[in-house]
Amino acid sequence: MKAILRPVLRHAFTLSAWLTLAAGTVQAAEDRDAKVHNDRMEVAAIGQWIYNDLPQAFAEGARTGKPLLVVLRCVP
Amino acid sequence: MDRFVCVRLVQANALDLSLFQFDFDLTFAVFFLNADRTLYGRFGTRSAQKDAARDISIEGFRLALTGALELHKGYPANKDFLIGKQARAPRFPTPENYPSLAGKYKPTLDYEGKVARSCMHCHQVGEAERAVFRAAHQPIPDEVLRPWPMPNALGLAFDPKAKARVAAVTPGSTAAKDGFKAGDEVLTLAGQPMLSIADAQWVLHTALAPTKLTAEIQRGRRKLKLPLTLPTKWRRAGDISWRPTSWDLRRMATGGLVLEEAGEAERRAAKIPTDELALRVKHVGQYGEHAAGKKAGFKPDDILVALDGQAKRMTESELFTQLLQTKLPGDRVSATVLRSGERVNLELPQQ
């Protein structure tokens, strides 16, 4: 069962990441300040991302042994 | 997702430039890193203003993620394999250290106030780098004027749905002469493992021409090595007019004029040969140093037909290169425009 689900989960993971990366492009109507505020709230709501805190990310990477995926995204 | 520590950075303020070196004209860029700061690879490519996502895809991103995990699995045994991918010593440790940005931004965003205004944009870093040369009254070198070149400048079109797969080779191009073929998977370039087009761009960005790089290729079942020749001035084949940082180049070189190629019908009507200059003034800046062109007498729809005594055909990108490498702030460059069929002589101020 795991083998069957793996590609699906992998796709879902990538899609989730992609949507997170692309967040901000669908907020054209918002003013620039609102975009920045909303981006922080939306990404926090996903719960999987460290927001604007690189030292925390490095510490988490060292603790868990996981690689870092750092997205630089221009929001406003 | 749980195989990575995921971080989102939304500001260039206080950005560690000894680690984050990327195409500063991007609006999103991805880094795959070890917690000890070793870089596995980059993702994120752009080569046009309107269709900003044409050079990336979810399929390509997935392959880059997988490739990064493989490199992480092999780390640190593969550390030497990754040396070429690491950032070079930056001119300044953070953007705020650039003279043109000093004192303008705080290291953190002002979420209690005007947060957007408190945010330094990545493209400002690229502009600040060029401003160093301009302020020193030095020509802006090709490497700074034309950063992060696309492989297309050598005749290689990469498939955005792959890591670094050649989708097409321009006949007669440098890459064609070197033996590249459509379908080739570039496994390594200059000894660096390729996770994405951005990784190939990094190699090209940091290469000093003229030189000959080595590419390890998978062609069907065969692995082979091909040279990739970078001739002198090869970067100049690329277009930089789409880049957000080109707005500042217009301030410097054209006093805020936006120029575009005149159409063929327009050329015929004005009797301008196809090998001669014909750049139409698409936009005239209105404020500050971007209004210098307007103050010099240029108007929308003027057609630039001679510059500095020459009428050789060139693109706006080539015009930037010519002016920013041969003229300095304070210079005035002779220019002739066609306006309602009449030739008008003006001077283009350099800033």
Image: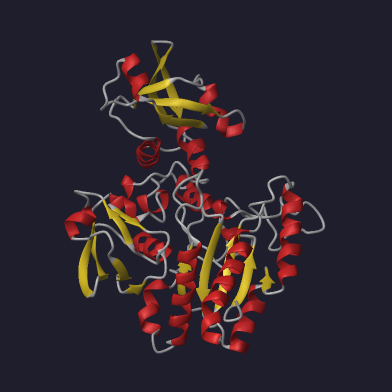
Residue B1 in the image: above or below residue B145? below
- Describe residue B216's horizontal placement relative to residue B144 as left or right: left
Q: Where is residue B187 in the image (x, y as percent from the top left)?
A: 32, 72
What's the residue at 40%, 46% (across, down)?
Answer: B138
Q: Position of residue B279 (x, y in %)?
A: 39, 27
Residue B196 in which image quadrant: bottom left
Residue B112 in which image quadrant: bottom right
Taking depth in this image into account, of B227 and A12 the one nearest to the observer is A12
- Describe residue B195's horizontal placement relative to residue A68 as left or right: left
Taking depth in this image into account, of B103 and B233 the one nearest to the observer is B233
Taking depth in this image into account, of B333 and B215 the one nearest to the observer is B215
Image mark count: 0
Residue A38 in the image: above or below residue B262? below
Residue B334 in the image: above or below residue B20? above
- Describe residue A65's horizontal placement relative to residue B194 as left or right: right
Q: Position of residue B288 (x, y in %)?
A: 61, 32
Residue B27 in which image quadrant: bottom right
What's the residue at 58%, 67% (across, down)?
Answer: A15
